Image (cartoon, rainbow, N blue to C red):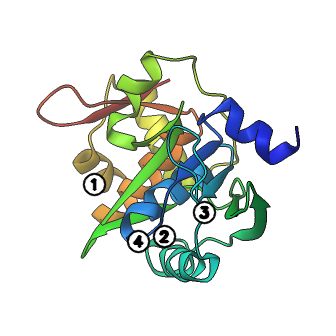
């Protein structure tokens, strides 16, 4: 059994995703971003969710993927492609490396960009990350150096039990988009825990 067959046999997981086709750049962007924000991953296009190989036209798929990576992911992503023949069909193997520019956001609609992470075999929006991570093992976090804006929220939480997005915008004098990005980054890297069960989401120290 070669490496590709082994990936298909093992099924989808936190680093492998199957797609029969890629037709909508906004939807595949969520998967791309979730891999880049977590541990990286591989997307096999031309494979159904159950592992059945259907094959694709790789040029069509690459066009949609390039559109998604460049215009529906922020910051944009660099993907690696490999065309593989298996059972008489062409599969496109797409590698998404773990990013050193976390967090990345996917464009859901005009002026609406959201963060995603990979939990088991699902791309999970960061606002739902707490619920999902409670159902699985704790994700492995990578601690990173912080700038003064990021340290400001940790200093605030050392003295206060919780902080909301609006409070953080005032504390650090940041725009909503930039403040949200920083909070997502701190959640992804394990500094903060997101609580989204109440009317207004809030963050606490992990």
Mark 4 Cα within 10 Å, few/some/many (few <14, many 20+)? few
Mark 3 Cα within 10 Å, few/some/many (few <14, many 20+)? many
Question: Would you say 180 lies left or right of 15 here?
Answer: left
Distance from the alpha carbon under mark 2 to that under mark 3 = 26 Å
Of 88 and 182, the residue lying toward us? 88
Mark 1 Cα within 10 Å, few/some/many (few <14, many 20+)? few
| Circle 1/circle 4 CB separation < 8 Å | no
Question: Would you say 201 lies left or right of 95 here?
Answer: left
In this view, the mark in front (1 or 3): 3
Distance from the alpha carbon under mark 1 to that under mark 4 = 41 Å
Is residue 66 in view from this perspective? yes
Residue under label 1: 170
User: Which dot marks residue 73?
Assistant: 2
Mark 2 Cα within 10 Å, few/some/many (few <14, many 20+)? many
196 w.r.t. 35: above or below: above
Distance from the alpha carbon under mark 1 to that under mark 2 = 27 Å
User: Which dot marks residue 23?
Assistant: 4
Distance from the alpha carbon under mark 2 to that under mark 4 = 16 Å
| Circle 2/circle 3 CB separation < 8 Å | no
- Of the two numbered discs 1 and 3 on the same chain, state the one appearing first in sequence: 3
- Give me the residue at 70% from left, 33% from top: 9
- Give me the residue at 41% from left, 71% from top: 23
- Give me the residue at 32% from left, 48% from top: 168
User: Which dot marks residue 14?
Assistant: none
User: Which dot marks residue 55?
Assistant: 3
């Amino acid at each position: 059994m070669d490496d590709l067959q082994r990936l298909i046999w093992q099924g989808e997981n936190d680093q492998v995703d199957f797609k029969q086709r890629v037709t909508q750049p906004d939807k595949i962007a969520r998967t791309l971003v979730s891999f880049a924000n977590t541990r990286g991953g591989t997307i096999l296009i031309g494979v159904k969710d159950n592992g059945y190989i259907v094959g694709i036209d790789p040029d069509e798929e690459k066009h949609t993927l390039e559109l998604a990576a460049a215009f529906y992911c922020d910051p944009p992503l660099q993907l690696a492609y490999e065309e593989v023949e298996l059972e008489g069909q062409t599969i496109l193997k797409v590698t998404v490396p773990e990013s050193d520019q976390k967090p990345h956001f996917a464009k859901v609609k005009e002026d609406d960009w959201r963060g995603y992470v990979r939990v088991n075999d699902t791309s999970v929006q960061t606002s739902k990350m707490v619920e999902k991570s409670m159902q699985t093992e704790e994700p492995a976090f990578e601690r990173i150096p912080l700038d003064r804006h990021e340290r400001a929220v940790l200093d605030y939480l050392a003295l206060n039990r919780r902080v909301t997005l609006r409070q953080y915008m005032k504390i650090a004098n940041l725009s909503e988009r930039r403040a949200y990005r920083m909070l997502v980054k701190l959640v992804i890297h394990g500094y903060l825990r997101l609580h989204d069960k109440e009317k207004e989401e809030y963050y606490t120290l992990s």
